[in-house]
Image (spheres, rainbow, N blue to C red):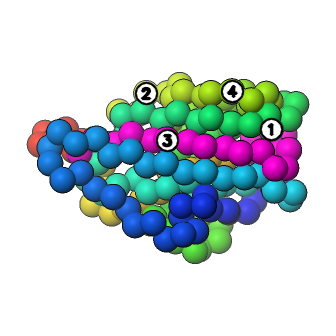
């Protein structure tokens, strides 16, 4: 299993945060698959801003090849960690078909993911089959500030 990063994480784009209680935070990540990406590899797509909860996630993927699926979830560690071997769950999307180009929407209830006082990361994990090379994956995650009394 290898860890990769979206163009935005590589560029060092800072984690953004809502400035008032009604602001949604949009975090965009893009990754182009490469030869050598395999099942179980994780791509850090962007920040999961501190003191926020996930509202939605949308993935626009290229044709990743027969039997290819994607998971989307929270990564271990903090945003931008260069530590190898970071792990990821499937809190937002689990086993979504990605064999052909298409759009993947959140297919899991995300309310069980509590906010944190640290900037974490969200990412995608290749499942089902090794992804085809040179395919663009763009994803957008929407986060809302944690409100008093809400986890």
Distance Cα–Cα, label 3 vs label 4: 14 Å
Q: Is mark 2 on a helix, strand or loop?
A: loop
Q: Is mark 3 on a helix, strand or loop?
A: strand
Instruction: Tell which circle, 3 or 4, labels the residue nearer the N-terminal end.
Output: 4
Instruction: Tell me where residue 83 sits by quadrant.
Output: bottom right
Which contiguous range is marked in magenta? 126-145
Distance Cα–Cα, label 1 vs label 3: 18 Å
Q: In this view, does 20 lie above or below 78?
A: above
Distance Cα–Cα, label 1 vs label 4: 10 Å
- Labelled disc at residue 64: 1
**Left or right of residue 129, residue 125 in this image:** left
- Labelled disc at residue 102: 4
Residue at coordinates 29% horizontally, 48% vertically from top-left? 52
Residue at coordinates 71% horizontally, 45% vertically from top-left? 136
Q: Is mark 4 on a helix, strand or loop?
A: strand
Q: Position of residue 10 (x, y in %)?
A: 58, 68
> What residue is pinned by disc 3?
140
Q: Is the magenta stretch mostly helix, strand or loop?
A: strand
Q: Where is residue 118 in the image (x, y as percent from the top left)?
A: 33, 63
Instruction: Tell which circle, 3 or 2, labels the residue nearer the N-terminal end.
Output: 2
Instruction: Tell which circle, 2 or 1, labels the residue nearer the N-terminal end.
Output: 1
Q: Nearer the viewer, mark 2 or mark 4?
A: 4
Out of 142 and 117, give the one closest to the viewer: 142
Q: Which residue lies furthest to the bottom in this view?
A: 82
Distance Cα–Cα, label 2 vs label 1: 25 Å
Q: Is residue 78 above or below residue 31?
A: below
Instruction: Tell which circle, 1 or 3, labels the residue nearer the N-terminal end.
Output: 1
> What residue is pinned by disc 2?
109
């Amino acid at each position: 299993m290898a860890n990769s990063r979206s163009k935005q994480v590589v560029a060092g784009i800072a984690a953004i945060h809502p400035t008032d209680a009604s602001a949604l935070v949009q975090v965009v990540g893009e990754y182009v698959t490469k030869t050598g990406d395999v099942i179980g590899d994780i791509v850090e797509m962007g920040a999961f801003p501190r003191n926020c909860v996930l509202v939605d996630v949308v993935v626009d993927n290229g044709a990743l090849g027969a039997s290819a699926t994607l998971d989307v979830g929270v990564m271990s560690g903090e945003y931008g960690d260069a530590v190898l071997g970071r792990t990821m769950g499937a809190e937002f999307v689990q086993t979504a078909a990605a064999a052909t180009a298409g759009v993947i929407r959140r297919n899991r209830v995300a309310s069980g993911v509590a906010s944190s006082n640290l900037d974490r990361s969200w990412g995608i994990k290749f499942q089902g089959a090794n992804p085809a090379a040179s395919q663009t994956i763009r994803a957008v995650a929407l986060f809302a500030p944690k409100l008093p009394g809400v986890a």
